[in-house]
Image: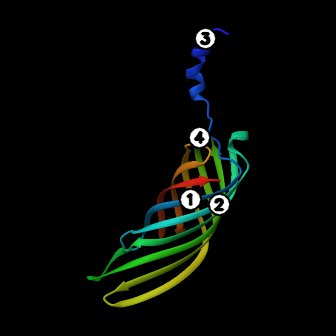
Amino acid sequence: MDIRKTAGLLPALCLVSTAAMAEGPYLGARLGFMDADISGLDSATNIGLIAGYNFGDVADDGMSWGIEAEFTTTVSDGDVDVAGLNGDWDIDTQAIYGVFRIGGDLYGKVRLGWLREDVSISVAGISADGSDDGLSGGLGGGWQVNEQLSLEAEYTRVEEDVDYYSIGAHFAF
């Protein structure tokens, strides 16, 4: 075999995707901010944990689907300013999503599922808590660094007035 022909193939081989989101379980973490579209409420910072299972291999046809359970909690309360009175708010979520991914090393992601939220607000020494559940969905994109590690950026609609913008990483087993 001619070494020059082999060396000439190296640049082309570098363009071929070698990472693939394999079928199986994964764990992840994400950090982001809950953006409340409510007058007087600033964003809260949340951290999340994800446990998921991917059905199918992206390398086969560029598509895969799976399920994800996600739990988020506030690590830095959002500020509240209502009629000149100051306070803070936080939100915790628990959700289960169906997930669809398309692409290779760089992929798009859509998820849809059911979410429960627990919200607390405190203004001028008066506190109120509430919870709600309902349909939630998200859009995102990711980079499959290798067979085990992927990095993602995502937008999730928590409810009509709350959106979650996050970045995170997943580790597949």
| Residues marked 1 and 4 touching at CB (< 8 Å) | no
Residue 99 horizontal side relative to residue 163, left or right = right
Q: Earlier in the sequence, mark 1 or mark 3?
A: 3
Looking at the image, which is closer to me, 79 or 2?
2
Asked if residue 167 is positioned above or below residue 85 in the image, the reply reads above
Query: Which scheme is used to colour this image of the protein?
Result: rainbow
Q: Secondary structure at mark 1?
A: strand
- Residue 20 is situated, as x and y percent measured from the top left of the image, at 65, 42
The mark found on residue 52 in the picture is 2
Q: Residue flagged by tag 2: what amino acid is it? A: Gly
Give the CA separation, mark 2 to mark 3.
45 Å
Among the 4 quarters of the image, the one containing residue 33: bottom left
- Give the residue at mark 4: 105
3 relative to 132, above or below: above
Does label 1 or label 4 sit earlier along the sequence? 1
Marks 1/2: CA–CA distance: 8 Å
Location of mark 3 (residue): 3
Between discs 3 and 4, the one toward the N terminus:
3
CB contact under 8 Å: marks 1 and 2: yes
